[in-house]
Amino acid sequence: MVFIITGASHTGKTKLAKMLVSKTGSFCLSIDHLKMGLIRSGNTSLTPYDDEELTGYLWPIVRGMIMTAVENSQDLIIEGCYVPFDWKDGLDDTYLSNIRYICLSMTPEYIASHLSDIISHASDAEKRLTDDDTSAEDLIRNNLAFAEGCRRAGNDILVIDNDWESDVSSWLGSI
């Protein structure tokens, strides 16, 4: 099985991926690691701030990795924000039946009432070099954009509106 975990920044994608690794023993690919490897190796002139262009550049590579994992009956977790809403395009039912996709999205109310928690947990799964520019407004805007894009495309969304741990644990229990 291939799991795709996506969502806006600070939604807990990497933390959820680590929890899923513990539960399933699957390998995990952070799309951020792929991105930075390609940028630092000089294989692209894109920068870490070129989000829209990076999605178009990285997704064909990630999709090819997913296809290979399915063809080889390998379990894989892919996590990152560089997954297009039309991610199913180019994948037939042979692949889609072996993929479980989830988009994490925090409600505006959750962000407003848990902003300090969100920021304090930002390095739970990885050390962030800086997190000084995180604002409630940016988080709300980005989460609403991900939720709307996923809804329009018919993708599964895990809405975080109560408690991150319990909302995510409920999803993990369904696996």
Image (tube, rainbow, N blue to C red):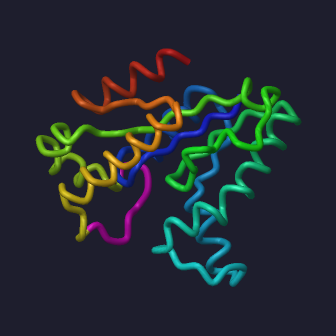
Q: Residue at x 28, y 66 (%)?
A: 131
Q: Residue furthest right?
A: 72
Q: Position of residue 79 (x, y in %)?
A: 55, 47
Q: Quadrant of residue 110?
A: top left
Nearest the eye: 18 or 80: 80
Please state, as top left, top right, bottom left or bottom right, where the N terminus lies in the image: top right
Q: Position of residue 61 (x, y in %)?
A: 74, 58
Q: Main secondary structure of the magenta part?
A: loop
In this image, 138 relative to 83: left or right?
left
Nearest the eye: 77 or 47: 47
In this image, 135 relative to 72: left or right?
left
Relative to 120, is 77 above or below? above
Relative to 151, is 33 above or below? below
Q: Residue at x 38, y 40 (%)?
A: 147
Q: Position of residue 19 (x, y in %)?
A: 49, 34
In this image, 148 relative to 112: left or right?
right
Q: Position of residue 114 (x, y in %)?
A: 16, 42
Q: Residue at x 50, y 15 (%)?
A: 174
Q: Residue at x 50, y 53 (%)?
A: 81
In this image, 73 relative to 141: left or right?
right
Range of residues picked out in magenta = 124-131
Nearest the eye: 153 or 105: 153
Residue 55 in the magenta stretch? The answer is no
